[in-house]
Amino acid sequence: MSTTREEAAAKARHVLGAEPRYHPDAELEGDTICGGYAFVAGDAAAIIGFDGGYQTSMLVLAGETMETLIAGWLVEQRHRHSTHACPICGATTFHTGRYPASVCPECHARAADRGGRRIVGYNEGISGGLIVFYAEATGGPQTEIAAEVLATGRCWIDGIECTIGEARFGGVVIEALAPPA
């Protein structure tokens, strides 16, 4: 988030040509990549994005409500920014077509083996390869290899089974096998 609510209100005042009223929306403001703030001034409305972009609407003339304006903004911005909802927690995370069920960084950090021991994955070297350690081990952090995770390519986050593997151009990717019920 780079634009504050006060900065967004000033921009809304400028683009709407009137004193705007703040319109709170948890989903819009909760999406730290694609979100922003919503404002209304009479029949005109504006969404000012965290990245400084904006969209305006004459609600009645456009046949919109604030809810449809916000929903449309989020769809458009999520497509533009290539994001999707994390299949574990629902937070917005970056999307690539190769890994459509990838989890957000916060869920990635909670990955564990079948028994609940937290794991950490890395590339073995500059040319790749996957290595997975237990985050905490008797010999110290990341001294014990998580052999079962390496052999099966499976890990769990909040009880949800996931795959763990080497990403195509480096790094480690974790994807949920099935969304939470």
Image: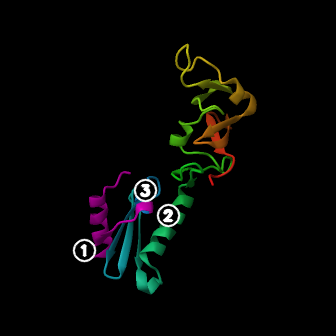
Could you classify mark 3 by the number of other residues whose Cα lies within 10 Å: few (under 14), some (14-19), or many (20 or more)? some
Could you classify mark 1 by the number of other residues whose Cα lies within 10 Å: few (under 14), some (14-19), or many (20 or more)? some
Asked if residue 39 is positioned above or below residue 78 in the image, the reply reads: below
Residue bearing mark 1: 19
- Sequence-wise, which precedes: disc 1 or disc 2? 1
- Identify the element where label 2 is drawn: helix
Could you classify mark 2 by the number of other residues whose Cα lies within 10 Å: few (under 14), some (14-19), or many (20 or more)? many
Q: Amino acid at mark 2?
A: Leu
Q: Nearer the viewer, mark 2 or mark 3?
A: 3
Q: Amino acid at mark 1?
A: Glu
Q: Is residue 69 left or right of residue 130?
A: left
View extreme (right): residue: 151
Q: Amino acid at mark 3?
A: Gly
Q: Pinpoint residue 69: horizontal percent, then vertical percent.
A: 46, 73
> Along the line of sight, which residue is nearer the eye, 95 or 28?
28
Q: CA distance from mark 1 to mark 2?
A: 24 Å
> Along the line of sight, which residue is nearer the eye, 94 or 25?
25
Q: CA distance from mark 2 to mark 3?
A: 11 Å
- Sequence-wise, which precedes: disc 2 or disc 3? 3
- Identify the element where label 1 is drawn: loop
Please identify the quarter of the rendering in which residue 158 is found: top right
Residue bearing mark 3: 30
Q: CA distance from mark 3 to mark 1?
A: 24 Å
Quadrant showing the C terminus: bottom right
Magenta stretch bounds: 1-27
> Along the line of sight, which residue is nearer the eye, 3 or 135?
135
Confirm whether the magenta stretch covers residue 13: yes
Q: Pinpoint residue 31: horizontal percent, then vertical percent.
A: 45, 56
Q: Is residue 18 left or right of residue 97?
A: left
Residue bearing mark 2: 74
